[in-house]
């Protein structure tokens, strides 16, 4: 694996103003969708970005794709500043997006072959119509569809097949980074595995990097090399897959992991879910201290006042933002981890 | 299958594929099960055919003055006393065959109304796409102009525009461009409907992810508008255009009837009715009545076709 750094996200903040009123709009507050997110993605690596709905994980993806402008911080792709209002067309090509909903992501009036040929022609990646069609066949083959599918329209395909078409269309741009925004959440469980395996195969063949966004830890476990857990616009724990799954520290990560069923019945019987109390606070008015303090089962008085920084626990392999990082393992035991 | 990708034979195959898909489509099926719509389609088809090749269909070349004979003036229709089978629907004050005049007039009427509808579709769809896609002040500007446009009745717009150009260009130049002027005048009064409909659908469609995907791959906005959004908002445009075609035919006839339309050298159905109108009370009723019936059946058939399309293409009525 090439360990060259492909993407650097540094202190990324994306704030959305909230306005009220129709004629006399007034500014009533700011939603800090992303509030100081930093991470690094290497070539050929997959970073899993996990968090519940509304935690800002999709907004991070959109900022990298240049679909929203960062309020502060920067996105550096292969040495170039990306994520501005109008990124260069070349940069656009090198970062592509895989969508969550395979039904709305394909133009119903455009044949599959046309949809895939479009970026090939646009970027002049093949010259001559024969070469373009040859490329379309290659791409269909690459994602496990047949060349005979080129003349068909999206409504003739199942959800899983459509997701493959979406992947082929993204690959047609010959990208280096794919932002996968919950690419399997809308699919059946059996199909989910197929798509995840396909993405893994493609990564091996083409040396792609993935930013894999998901709301659950189980899908991420199969595909990620590293995992970052987000809560209310911030990364609260990040590290190598082994670190996050075997030795999670942050109480939120531990609670998330306790919700994942274990395939071993002996362990599963002993699994105790950590049920979090309360709701996510309003993103317009976040708590002053640790964002998680209101729901945290082990929060102390200090957690309500002081915002914890992301601190390295294992150099280069595991960072946590928690004031009680040293105590969480003892206070919140996880059956699944102890078994190994 | 590989033949699909080679040029010549492949294109032909794809074309026949498209034809088969069309014959197999819901719309074609609806047509087959609706005798009224089928009848309307045939009537409109015959009209279009007659208008396209008037010299083949019309029994007399009405614009060739040398063939006119004053002895034939005011000859009544063939089945009446004094009628002749040479002049099936009678002849006018100069011995011109009414049927032939109708067929040549039809050509002008249809050309003007089809061109006017095409122009208003082009204006309305483009502005609607832009308003819906960009939103913001561009959207507000376009839609406020549309609102203002709607407060003027179509007839008034046409009269205003006609008068404006008449005073700007002078009578002579106006005469030469009369056909273009009436086309633009009718088009200007019709574009708002398309703009509003297309804007509404564009607001919805441009939020779909395939539009985002096209932006992600760096497609220029114009390409996204016409290749990705337009095909998905076009269905209601077809329906409105068909119904508007009937309105345009009537509007053209009305303008020509009051003398604001096409010049008398290129008579349309409206012009024929206006000329014939002068003889209604003196007994030569066929001069106004037959062009009137021709207009009536044309508008009726187009309207029936429009109503059918509106129902057939409306998914909520299935």
Image (cartoon, coloured by chain):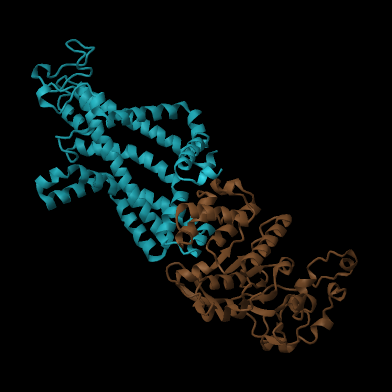
Chain colours: A brown, B cyan
- Is B258 rendered above or below residue A230? above
Which is nearer the eye, A321 or B228? B228
- Left or right, residue B36 beside residue B90: right
Q: Position of residue A188 (x, y in %)?
A: 71, 55
Q: Residue at x 16, y 26 (%)?
A: B62
Residue A15 sits in quarter = bottom right
Residue A319 sits in quarter = bottom right
Q: Quadrant of the C terminus of chain B?
A: top right
Q: Position of residue B209 (x, y in %)?
A: 54, 59
- Left or right, residue B133 beside residue B158: right
Q: Residue at x 41, y 65 (%)?
A: B136
As drawn, the residue found furthest toward the top would be B81
Q: Quadrant of the N terminus of chain B?
A: top right
Which is nearer the eye, A235 or B284? A235
Which is nearer the eye, B316 or A263? A263
Q: Residue at x 48, y 40 (%)?
A: B313
Q: Position of residue B197 (x, y in %)?
A: 42, 50
Q: Position of residue B270 (x, y in %)?
A: 22, 33
Q: Residue at x 21, y 16 (%)?
A: B77
- Is A287 rendered above or below residue A53? below
- Left or right, residue A173 beside residue B36: right
């Amino acid at each position: 694996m090439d360990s060259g750094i492909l993407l650097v996200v540094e202190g990324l903040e994306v704030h959305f103003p909230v306005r009220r009123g129709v004629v006399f709009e007034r500014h009533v507050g700011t939603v800090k969708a992303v509030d100081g997110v930093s991470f690094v993605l290497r070539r050929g690596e997959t970073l899993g970005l996990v968090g519940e709905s509304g935690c800002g994980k999709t907004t991070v993806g959109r900022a990298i794709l240049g679909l929203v402008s960062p309020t502060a911080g920067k996105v550096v792709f292969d040495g170039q500043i990306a994520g501005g209002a109008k990124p260069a067309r070349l940069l656009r090509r090198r970062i592509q997006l895989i969508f969550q909903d395979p039904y709305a992501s394909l133009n119903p009036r455009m044949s599959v072959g046309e949809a895939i040929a479009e970026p090939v022609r646009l970027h002049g990646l093949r010259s001559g119509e024969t070469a373009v069609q040859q490329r379309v066949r290659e791409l269909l083959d690459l994602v496990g569809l047949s060349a005979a599918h080129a003349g068909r329209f999206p409504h003739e395909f199942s959800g899983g097949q459509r997701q493959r078409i979406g992947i082929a269309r993204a690959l047609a741009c010959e990208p280096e980074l794919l932002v996968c925004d919950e690419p399997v959440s809308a699919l059946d469980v059996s199909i989910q595995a197929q798509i995840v395996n396909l993405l893994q195969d493609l990564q091996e063949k083409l040396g792609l990097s993935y930013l894999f966004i998901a709301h659950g830890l189980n899908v991420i476990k199969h595909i990620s090399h590293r995992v970052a857990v987000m809560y209310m616009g911030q990364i609260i724990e990040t590290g190598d897959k082994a670190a996050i799954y075997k030795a999670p520290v942050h109480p939120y990560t531990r609670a998330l992991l306790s919700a994942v069923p274990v395939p071993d019945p002996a362990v599963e019987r002993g699994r105790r879910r950590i049920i979090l109390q309360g709701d996510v606070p309003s993103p317009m008015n976040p708590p002053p201290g640790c964002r998680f303090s209101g729901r945290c089962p082990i929060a102390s008085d200090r957690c309500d006042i002081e915002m914890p920084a992301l601190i390295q626990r294992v150099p280069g392999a595991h960072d946590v933002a928690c004031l009680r990082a040293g105590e969480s393992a003892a206070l919140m035991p996880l059956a699944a981890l102890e078994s190994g | 299958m590989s033949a699909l990708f080679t040029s010549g034979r492949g294109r032909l195959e794809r074309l026949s594929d498209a034809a088969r898909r069309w014959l197999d489509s819901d719309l074609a099926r609806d047509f087959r099960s609706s005798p009224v719509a089928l009848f309307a389609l045939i009537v409109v088809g015959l009209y279009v055919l007659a208008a396209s090749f008037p010299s083949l269909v019309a029994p007399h070349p009405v614009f060739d003055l040398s063939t006119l004979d004053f002895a034939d003036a005011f000859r009544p229709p063939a089945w009446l006393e004094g009628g002749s089978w040479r002049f099936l629907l009678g002849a006018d004050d100069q011995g011109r065959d009414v049927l032939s005049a109708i067929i040549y007039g039809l050509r002008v009427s249809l050309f003007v109304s089809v061109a006017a509808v095409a122009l208003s579709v082009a204006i309305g769809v483009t502005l609607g796409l832009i308003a819906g896609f960009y939103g913001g002040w561009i959207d507000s500007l376009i839609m406020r102009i549309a609102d203002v446009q709607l407060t003027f009745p179509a007839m008034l717009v046409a009269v205003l525009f006609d008068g404006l150009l008449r005073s700007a260009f002078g009578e002579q130049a106006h005469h030469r461009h009369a056909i273009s002027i009436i086309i633009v005048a009718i088009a200007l009064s019709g574009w708002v409907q398309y703009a509003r409909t297309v804007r509404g659908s564009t607001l919805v469609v441009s939020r779909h992810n395939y539009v985002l995907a096209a932006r992600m791959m760096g497609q220029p906005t114009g390409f996204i508008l016409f290749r990705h959004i337009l095909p998905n908002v076009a269905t209601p445009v077809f329906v409105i255009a068909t119904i508007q075609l009937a309105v345009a035919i009537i509007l053209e006839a009305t303008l020509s009837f009051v003398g604001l339309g096409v010049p008398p050298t290129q008579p349309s159905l409206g012009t024929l009715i206006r000329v014939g109108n002068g003889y209604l009370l003196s007994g030569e009723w066929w001069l106004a009545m037959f062009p009137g019936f021709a207009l009536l059946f044309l508008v009726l058939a187009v309207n029936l076709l429009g109503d059918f399309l509106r129902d057939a293409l409306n998914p909520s009525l299935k």
